[in-house]
């Protein structure tokens, strides 16, 4: 039986590239998004749209849809980016980034825990901008803070889920050519997806909780 992966934010960008990657690898792909796309429908065994991962009722509906099913891999990919600078801080934007980039992955993971059995994996798509040690340029207050929070959540999940045999990774895709950065990236979504998939494949309970670049580099907290 084919392995099953559920990907949030799967309708475009890195999420869509991951859906394509796992489809081509023979996986059963479940794409979760707010707005479906023809590109996602072409590779997903099932598309669940209308899901806002920040809304508790939507996440509950997602969990109900998988009440009697199992997942081998959960990829928390949905996210957003705003650019704030000191003197022009938008606290509503900072709050929104915390909701979708940090709280939502934790909410989705907890809701789908009954679907994750021994040997399953959770991959949180984070950013090296969540690294405090690596911050030498400042700015991006909301994005840096929410990704640092996601890294902290992921580390705790790794500890708490280890007895269940579930491994967790925090993965930075790289500077990817997506709409989030106006396509001004260094690598394609396909390259990022391939690297992320390699890191997930190599993930074990021994390495669970780590923070890696998609190219395999271990990143500082």
Image (tube, rainbow, N blue to C red):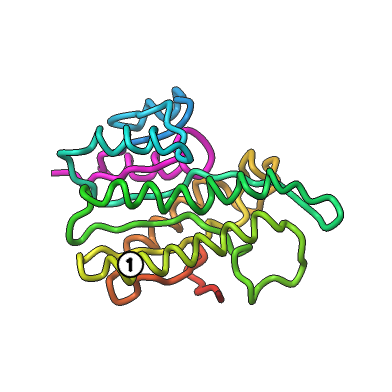
Q: Give the residue at mark 1.
A: 203
Secondary structure of residue under mark 1: loop
Q: Residue at x 51, y 52 (%)?
A: 191
Q: Is residue 125 above or below residue 31?
A: below
User: Is 109 displayed left or right of 217 in the figure?
Assistant: left
Q: Which residues are magenta?
A: 1-29
Q: Residue at x 38, y 44 (%)?
A: 21
Q: Is residue 33 above or below residue 144?
A: above
Q: Quadrant of the N terminus?
A: top left
Q: Quadrant of residue 130?
A: bottom right
- The front one of 91 and 84 is 91
Whether residue 58 is in magenta: the answer is: no
Where is residue 149? Give x, y as percent.
Answer: 53, 62
Q: Residue at x 44, y 63 (%)?
A: 153
Where is residue 117? Give x, y as percent.
Answer: 18, 56
Q: Is residue 145 above or below residue 134?
A: above
**Outermost residue toward the left?**
1
Where is residue 71? Give x, y as percent.
Answer: 23, 47
Where is residue 167? Give x, y as percent.
Answer: 30, 65
Q: Is residue 16 visible?
A: no
Image label count: 1
Q: Quadrant of residue 6?
A: top left
- The front one of 99 and 162 is 99
Q: Is residue 96 visible?
A: yes
Q: Residue at x 17, y 61 (%)?
A: 118
**Outermost residue toward the top?**
38
Q: Quadrant of the C terminus?
A: bottom right
Whether residue 24 is in magenta: the answer is: yes
């Amino acid at each position: 039986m084919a392995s099953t992966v559920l990907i949030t934010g799967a309708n475009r960008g890195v999420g869509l590239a991951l859906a394509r990657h796992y489809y081509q690898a023979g996986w059963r792909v479940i794409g979760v998004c707010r707005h479906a796309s023809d590109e996602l429908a072409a590779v997903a065994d099932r598309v669940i749209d209308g899901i806002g991962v920040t809304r508790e009722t939507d996440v509950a509906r997602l969990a109900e849809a998988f009440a009697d099913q199992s997942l081998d891999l959960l990829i928390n990919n949905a996210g957003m980016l705003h650019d704030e600078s000191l003197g022009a801080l938008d606290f509503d934007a900072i709050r929104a980034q915390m909701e979708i980039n940090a709280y939502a992955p934790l909410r989705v993971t907890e809701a789908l825990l009954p679907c994750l059995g021994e040997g399953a994996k959770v991959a949180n798509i984070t950013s090296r901008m969540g690294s405090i040690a690596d911050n030498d340029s400042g700015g991006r207050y909301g994005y840096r803070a929410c990704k640092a929070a996601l890294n902290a959540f992921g580390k705790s999940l790794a500890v708490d889920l280890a007895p269940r045999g579930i491994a967790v990774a925090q993965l930075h895709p790289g500077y990817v050519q997506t709409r989030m950065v106006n396509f001004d990236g260094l690598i394609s979504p396909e390259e990022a997806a391939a690297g992320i998939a390699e890191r997930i494949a190599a993930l074990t309970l021994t390495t669970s909780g780590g923070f890696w670049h998609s190219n395999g580099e271990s990143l500082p907290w």
